[in-house]
Structures are given as C-alpha cells and as structure tokens.
Image: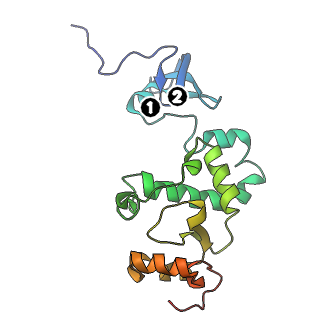
Amino acid sequence: MPRHSKYPSIGPGSRFGKLTVIRKMRHTKNYNQRYLCRCDCGNEVSVSNSRLNSGQRKRCAIGMCRANRSGLFTGRNRPLYQRTYSSYSAMKSRCLNKTHTGYEYYGGRSVTISARWLEPAPQGFLNFLADMGLRPRDKTLDRKNPFGNYEPDNCQWATAKWQANNKRANYTPEEIVTNFEQGVPSLQNPELETAAF
C-alpha cells in the first residue's frame, strides 16, 4: 500500500505564515525538496519542505522583515536603531510571548501595549520611535507607573538605578495614584535620581 504523508501537499499558492509558495526548486544534498516562496513584505526566499511543514519558517527572516526591506536595519541605520529596537522587542516579548521568562510579571498581569506600537512592522516600531525617541546609552525602557501599561504617557528611558527603585514592591496602587496627582517629581523624572523614595 502507498505511504501517505501526514502533511498536505505543497504547490504554487500554498500559504505558510507570511510565505506563499511560487514554484518547486531542486532537491538539496539530503534530498529535501525546496520551494521558492514570496513573503508578504515582497522578499523571495528558498525554503525546504521540512521547514515549511514543521512551521520553522513562516516569513522571509526572523524579526522585522518589512523593516529590513525599508532599510531601517541596514548600513549606517543598523547601529542607530538597534539599541532602541532591542528595548521595543523585549517589551513585546514580556507582554505577548507566554514562553518568555518574564511573561508572568507583565502579560500574565494583564500589562498591555499601546495599539499604535503594535501596528504591523515596521510601522509599530516607527510609532514607538516617534513617541519615545532613540534609547540613550545606559538607559532602558521604564514605566513611570509600574502598575500601568506600556503607553506613550507612561513610558520613559531610565537607568538601572532608577528602575530598581521604581518597582511595584515599593508602592501600593493608591500611593502611585496619589503621587502622580500631586506631581511628585521622583515618579516622573528619572533624571532626579536623588529624590527620596
């Protein structure tokens, strides 16, 4: 009796994530069939049938494939934006990726991200960049109100020292609200690190 594959047949038009199969290509040395695929961003890539069927390859490249096409992370732009994108990507992972080590403290606590920062790449990152500016050296992304969400009005670039003090464990939600209403500078300006906590 003929053997039946557990995977559906692959042909022109088949979809795998953001990849659409265009045509069959030659076999690899290990006899793996390869297919020419077009990503939604416009890139064309060669992918083996095993990686398509297993779900290992769902786009032209890991990360912001559209951003790479628009030149955000190529040439001189790469070192300019890389540090800022690292913080942007880490924020999304903490809130959206259930396998991330910090998910239970962020996404697991229903911490959300501004909708404009979650728009399809690269627009989401460009919106984040417009709202937050480039990440300064020795600073990372911090929520002014540690009980709040990742939103333009509640985020700032802050040092590790500042963030060590600005934690949920140091306040009650009521204290946070009261301090913000009274305009306590220690909660709003990470440059004033001498302020008492």
Using residue 80 as the reference point, say whether residue 105 is left or right of it. Answer: left
Task: Say which amino acid is labelled 2.
Answer: Val
Using the image as rendered, state which of residue 76 and residue 170 is in the foreground. Answer: 170
* Closer to the camera in the image, 103 or 68: 103
> Residue 92, image x and y in percent?
50, 54
51, 104: nearer the viewer = 104
For residue 51, the mark is 1
The residue at 53%/22% (across/down) is: 20
- Crowd class of label 1 (few under 14; some 14 to 19; many from 20; radius 10 Å): some
Q: Residue at x 67, y 58 (%)?
A: 131
As drawn, 172 above or below 26: below
Q: Residue furthest top?
A: 1
**CA gap, disc 1 and disc 2:** 7 Å
User: Which residue carries the number 2 mark?
Assistant: 47
Residue 183 lies, in percent from the top left, at 58, 81
Residue kind at label 1, given as amino acid type: Arg
Do the CB atoms of the residues marked 1 and 2 lie less than 8 Å apart?
yes
Q: Going 29% across and 21% down the picture, which residue do you hit?
A: 6
Vertical side of 149 occupied by 19: above or below: above
Q: Position of residue 8 (x, y in %)?
A: 36, 18
User: Quick check: 138 left or right of 170?
Assistant: right
